[in-house]
Image: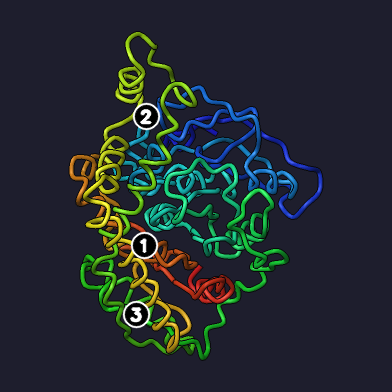
Amino acid sequence: MADAHNAFVTEETIEGDDTGPLVGSTVAVKDNISTEGVRTTCGSDMLADYVPPYDATVVSRLKEAGATVVGKTNMDEFGMGTTTETSAFGATTNPVDDERVPGGSSGGSAAAVAAGQADYALGSDTGGSVRCPAAFCGVVGIKPTYGLVSRYGLVAYANSLEQIGPLASTVEGAAELLDVIAGPDAHDATTREEGADSDYASAANGDVDGLTIGVPTELLEGADDEVRRVFEDALDAYRDAGAEVEEVSLPSVEYGVAAYYVIAMSEASSNLARFDGVRYGESGGFEGNWNESFAETRAENLGDEVKRRILLGTYALSAGYHDKYYEQAQEARAWVRQDFEEAFESVDVLATPTMPVLPPKLGESVDDPLRMYLMDANTVPVNLANLPAISVPAGESTEGLPVGLQLVGPKFGEEQIIDAAALLG
């Protein structure tokens, strides 16, 4: 199938086993997840020719489940972006509307599913990077609880925030893929026993009778009118099915985006230090001193957004600013986690619009980084609190553009959000 939306960086078939729950299914894999013998670029010139010598744990599990991997999907460079326009291999377009972005950073994965180029896809979600493109492309995306899915073989951006998650055209399909990749892994000490014998797919019933859904008022305030209309209609569908909907407050989310970006950029500045042309990455040559060589390598092979985040993260961790920025961001993170815990004392799940805006047109966000960062207001608090969330199509705007509804659950509450999401998808 022609790649009309530039969803793939590399199209290459990796055959799975002859038996398993995914035999006959195709899966696209985000290009920051290692695949033995198939290049893994992270959407960057820095790794344009990098071929991993091993499979990520999730890829091994896909193959064991009988899935056929059909290629590595385009992404914002090193996962840094919300539109899949910062890729060194060109922007991905949205299959719903070629003039609009597919979301990011897992935009290629969502576009591949939306365009029918793969049955399923894997993305990674550091601050919404699975849920955002799922919402913009009209598919389903799950961000699992931190520790449910192994990160072994995922090229690190912000270790304490990111999780690999599934995308599919239906809630049941996304849950089936989550069943395959979830569970403990000896290669990743952050994984937990939860998910070892999961059957999330059987939870996709849409049985919400008696469910209490909390709607955080703070995460509705900035939503576009069209997004809000579709979201309210979806809430009515839940009420009609027997769910109770009530307002809740998460006062800490006012600081969520700021805290997230300080933490994420700080971790990125540390993680990306290895891309210096010696350990990893294209060499810039070694004439002159080492610092000059490293600087030349990074100047030539890293994009503007990646450089921006590394610089800001290094600044936040530097002497004299660590306490002012990084430490305060961690305190805000603890507050966010506490607010979620208190909310779940009175409700079963939380519901918000996945993204507060409709998919922007190509080029609209690239020159305005602050606007792009603020688009993440509804998704980043979930990563700060290490909770599970799902984005499911809730309806369309009057222009025919997809609007996603996000359901957030307590830790390892995947079954709850999958069950509730199945009412819509």
What x and y, as percent, mark residue 53? 64, 29
What x and y, as percent, mark residue 391? 44, 64
The residue carrying mark 2 is: 88
Q: Looking at the rendered structure, which numbered label has been put on residue 379? A: 1
Q: Quadrant of the N terminus?
A: top right
Q: Residue at x 49, y 45 (%)?
A: 109
Q: Is 369 drawn above or below residue 332 in the view shown?
A: above
N-terminal of the pair, mark 2 or mark 3, is 2
CA–CA distance between discs 2 and 3? 38 Å
The residue carrying mark 3 is: 215
Q: Secondary structure at mark 1?
A: loop
In the image: residue 96, left or right of residue 22 = left
Residue 245 showing in the rendered view: yes
Q: Secondary structure at mark 2?
A: loop
Q: Residue at x 33, y 15 (%)?
A: 289
Furthest-top residue in this view:
287
- Crowding around mark 2 (Cα neighbors within 10 Å: few <14, some 14 to 19, many 20+) is many
CA–CA distance between discs 2 and 1? 25 Å
Amino acid type assigned to the residue bearing label 3 in the image: Val
Quick one: 91 or 315, which is closer to the camera?
315
N-terminal of the pair, mark 3 or mark 1, is 3
What x and y, as percent, mark residue 392? 46, 65
Q: Which image quadrant is residue 77 in?
A: top left
What x and y, as percent, mark residue 414? 56, 70
Amino acid type assigned to the residue bearing label 1 in the image: Thr
Furthest-right residue in this view:
19
Dots 2 and 3: beta carbons under 8 Å?
no
Q: Residue at x 54, y 43 (%)?
A: 154
